[in-house]
Image: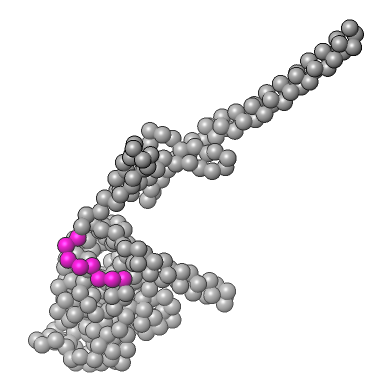
Amino acid sequence: MKKYRGGLIMRVNKFAAGFAVLALVLGLLLIQPLALAQRAVTIFLDGREIRSDVAPVIIDGRTMVPIRAISEGLGMAVEWDDKNYRVLISSATVPVSGTIPSFADNLDIRGQAVLSAEQLEALMIKNNPDAPRELPELYLSIGAEYGIRGDIAFCQAAKETGWWRFGGLVQPYQNNYCGLAATGQAATGAEDLRGADPGRVRFENGVHGAIFSSPAAGVEAHIQHLYAYACKNTLPSGKSLVDPRFVLITRGIAAQWSDLNGRWAVPGVGYGESILTDYYYKAFTSTSNYALSEQEQLKRLQIENQLLKQEINRLKAI
């Protein structure tokens, strides 16, 4: 009987010990959710907080977020297929009339614009509400007259002027949107216009870069400069020269935007790619009614990867 009681006591002690261990484990499991609950997980999409009926949770170190909140935040439609137990997510993009050129075509300086004036204006206002509103239409219309991609030329101007905030050597009143003749040395006023129309462009003593008589003249000079780089043709019929540096360019040396590297800007590593990646493609993701295709997205990632490698090499060389 004593042995039985001892065995009973032993079994009771083992049970108590097991219960204590179980309680400890449960306590530890409960502590983590309570601690995490004190700091709620929030979702931000493009800097805007996304609220959902189902809160994000952290399970085994993995953050679980509600897919509907994210998808709808990206403008997609989310449906539940009860029959097949599937979540169906579809893009809410709007079909675009006309043919969108492939990504490779978008790299050419010459060609037809893809973005509209409204899209360019929306992108411009997003970055600088005070920028001149007439510029998108000017770039598209004048670019078309020369067969130059006016939409990408507009993006180059955005890069050169800091979204028309300027802040460098060139001032807003000069209507000089691409830094023409701004070489770091102020003009004397006696500079040779090299055949450019003196009624539309001039130099002034102490001023950096060319001064154009109007926004339209400044845009046309920019387009002419690209035209000189991209082809060997004479100016289109009825056009007068506005770019005072037109004749200094080796004609047809840059057919694509990436060919401007080291030519338009010195040293200019990644200059052309930056126009596309940092400016032009932003219009597709922030203002356009359609998204980039998989091929276009892949090309964009390749360009970004190339720029990153170049930056790494530059930093290593310092």
User: Which is more toward the observer, 58 or 205?
Assistant: 58
Is 287 positioned to the left or the right of 269 in the image?
left
Q: Quadrant of residue 221?
A: bottom left
Q: Which residues are magenta?
A: 96-103
Q: Quadrant of residue 127?
A: bottom left
Magenta residue check for 311: no
Q: Is the magenta region chiefly helix, strand or loop?
A: loop
> From this viewpoint, is residue 254 visible?
yes
Colouring used for the render: one colour
Q: Residue drawn 31% across and 71% down?
A: 103
> Where residue 20 appears, x then y in whole percent?
72, 22
Q: Residue drawn 32% across and 74% down?
A: 104
How many badges with numbers are in the image? 0
Question: Which quadrant is home to the C terminus?
Answer: bottom right
> Where residue 189 appears, x then y in whole percent?
25, 86
- Residue 88 vs 317, above or below: the answer is above
Magenta residue check for 98: yes
